[in-house]
Amino acid sequence: MIHYGATLDVARELVWFVARVLHTERRRRGTRRGRRALTPYWQAVLVLRWFRDATPLHRLAADHRISVATAYRYLHEAITALAAQAPDLHQVLRERHTRGDTHVILDGTLIPCDRVAATTIKTKGKNRGRIVHLWYSGKHRAFGGNIQFLASPDGFPLWVSAVLPGSRNDLSAARDHGIVGALTAAAGQGLRTLADKAYHAAGIGILTPFKKTAGQPPLNARQRVHNLLHARARALGERAMALLKTRWRALTHISLCPHRIGHIVQAALVLTHHEHHGRY
């Protein structure tokens, strides 16, 4: 076996932040001092290596001289503790309104995962009644979890939802999470939402592009200009999820239980917010 050095490209202050969260979690659980194989600091290093570089758990276990089962347990413990720090949807909307923002950006993404055997019966569309894979997204042609997120006007991630199976479309996911109701209420106070065509007719205050429907005349000049301006403003929201996925490579493919995807993305959001020191 060959040993070599490596550098984890995160600020030391972020490691101490995660360590403090883990220390608080251990105290909440009543863990006695000296009963863990790793200190909160080195557990934080293990967790950040997984998030930042998607380092396999068996390698992390070997590097820290612990069992693979312990490495998994430490990782899941940290994911849960960090996800609990994620901001609430209503809190985020109140803060953006207080800051004087005119709008936020709503979008959905698929976080890829390993193939899942669970199935469901399709209830809508031409294939209604057909058995399909629950976690398979026909739009993305991949297995994964549907995550809804809000971004600031300049494309910084503000909030992410829990996970739903990849077979769910964005509009139904937004409704199930209560996002549509919250955004409609925010629109009544002047904070509107920009979204793509997937959210068409979602609710008052959720602005989407004009759609060309079958049997209807082409879009007129005013509608085309509206769509162009809308697309330019909304496109910045794509930066939000790109920021999370490129900074935390673990989000590019999840090999853990797919039901944990929501907590993993929420934990990544907390890490990103802390790296920017509450700027947003």
Image (cartoon, rainbow, N blue to C red):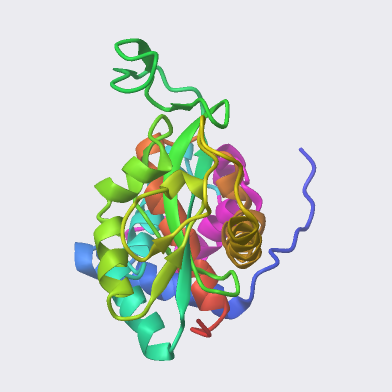
Q: Position of residue 169 (x, y in %)?
A: 41, 37
Residue positioned most to the top: 130
Q: Quadrant of residue 237?
A: bottom right
Identify which residue is drawn at 57% across, 76% down.
275
The number of discs equals 0
Q: Is residue 217 above or below residue 102?
A: above
Q: Which residue corresponds to the image point at 60% horizontal and 48% vertical from the top-left? A: 219
Query: 163 or 169, which is in the foreground?
Result: 169
Q: Nearer the viewer, residue 149 or 274?
A: 149
Rendered view: 41 above or below 178: below
Say whether residue 62 is left or right of residue 67.
right
Q: Is residue 83 left or right of residue 15?
A: left
Where does the N terminus fall, quadrant-wise? top right
Q: Nearer the viewer, residue 79 or 110?
A: 110
List the single residue furthest toward the bottom: 99
Across and down, in percent, residue 180 comes to 30, 57
Left or right of 126 on screen, residue 214? right
Q: Position of residue 264 (x, y in %)?
A: 44, 51
> Which residues fall within the magenta stretch?
35-64
